[in-house]
Each structure stands twice: as C-alpha cells, then as structure tokens.
C-alpha cells in the first residue's frame, strides 16, 4: 500500500516521466514519411503519433487541481495512509484515462500501418 502511494506521488509531481517514450515517438514521426508511401495513411499516422506525443507529455504532469490536495496533505506530515490514498485516487483515475486513450491511439495507428511498416518505424534503436 505504501509503495502504491509513493508511486502515485511520483506520478503526481511528474517525477515518473520517461523521456525515452517521447524519444521513441520522435523517432517514429521522423520515420513515417520515409516508410509509408501512401499519402493518406502517412498523414493519418503522423496525426496519431502527434496525439500520442501530446498525451505522453500530459501524463508527465497532472493538472495542478489534482495535485493541490495531495500537496497540502503532504505538508501537514500527519496525514494517514487512508487520507493520502483518498487524495491520490483522482490522480490515478486521471492517469488511467490517459493510458486508455494512449492504447486506443496505438490501436488506431496499428490499423493505419502494414506489419512491415510498423516493424520499420518501431525498430529497436542501434546500441552503440
């Protein structure tokens, strides 16, 4: 329980942001024009990737209104685990809704690309 609270606090204050995801999306955005020959599918794929990138940025920092209550609880130093859990629940619900939107966008992107295009766009980076 305490680990879940700590993880939610990290998410709430943007400390759980993974820059690698944004880097992967940037690399995919750069690859799409070279990999997808059909203009309509290419445009759609780029739009979806831009939406995904915006969502990842949004996930890094929840709206201030959601973190304000948690912040005030933490400043009191006497908040119980139950009170902290209650103030974290809206943040977790917000993060979950963003994750669900991200999955939906990924499925939409997958429908736009062939298996070969997907493999070329999301190929693992060279480890040098």
Image (cartoon, rainbow, N blue to C red):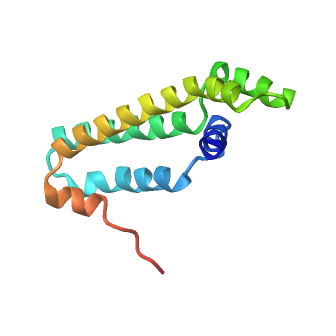
Residue at figure coordinates x 86%, y 26% from the top left: 76
Kindly indicate the quadrant of the structure image that contains residue 89: top right
Pinpoint residue 22: horizontal percent, then vertical percent. 48, 49
Compared across the picture, whether 39 is left or right of 67 comes to left
Which is more toward the observer, 6 or 17?
Answer: 6
Residue at figure coordinates x 60%, y 47% from the top left: 16
The vertical placement of 47 against 7, above or below, is: above
Compared across the picture, whether 38 is left or right of 53 comes to left
Which is more toward the observer, 69 or 103?
Answer: 69
Pinpoint residue 31: horizontal percent, then vertical percent. 32, 56
Total numbered badges shown on the rendered structure: 0
The vertical placement of 122 against 95, above or below, is: below
The vertical placement of 53 against 97, above or below, is: below
Residue at figure coordinates x 51%, y 56% from the top left: 20
Pinpoint residue 66: horizontal percent, then vertical percent. 63, 22
Which is more toward the observer, 117 or 79?
Answer: 79
Compared across the picture, whether 118 is left or right of 78 comes to left
The vertical placement of 96 against 20, above or below, is: above
Locate the N terminus by quadrant.
Answer: top right
Kindly indicate the quadrant of the structure image that contains residue 117: bottom left
Pinpoint residue 85: horizontal percent, then vertical percent. 63, 29
Kindly indicate the quadrant of the structure image that contains residue 8: top right
């Amino acid at each position: 329980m305490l680990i879940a609270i700590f993880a939610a606090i990290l998410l709430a204050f943007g400390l759980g942001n993974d820059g690698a995801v944004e880097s992967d999306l940037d690399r995919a955005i750069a690859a799409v024009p070279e990999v997808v020959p059909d203009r309509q599918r290419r445009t759609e794929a780029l739009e979806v990737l831009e939406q995904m990138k915006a969502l990842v940025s949004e996930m890094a920092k929840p709206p201030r209104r959601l973190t304000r209550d948690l912040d005030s609880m933490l400043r009191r130093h006497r908040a119980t685990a139950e009170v902290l859990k209650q103030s974290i629940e809206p943040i977790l619900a917000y993060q979950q809704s963003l994750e669900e939107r991200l999955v939906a966008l990924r499925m939409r992107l997958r429908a736009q690309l062939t298996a070969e295009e997907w493999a070329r766009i999301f190929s693992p980076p060279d480890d040098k």
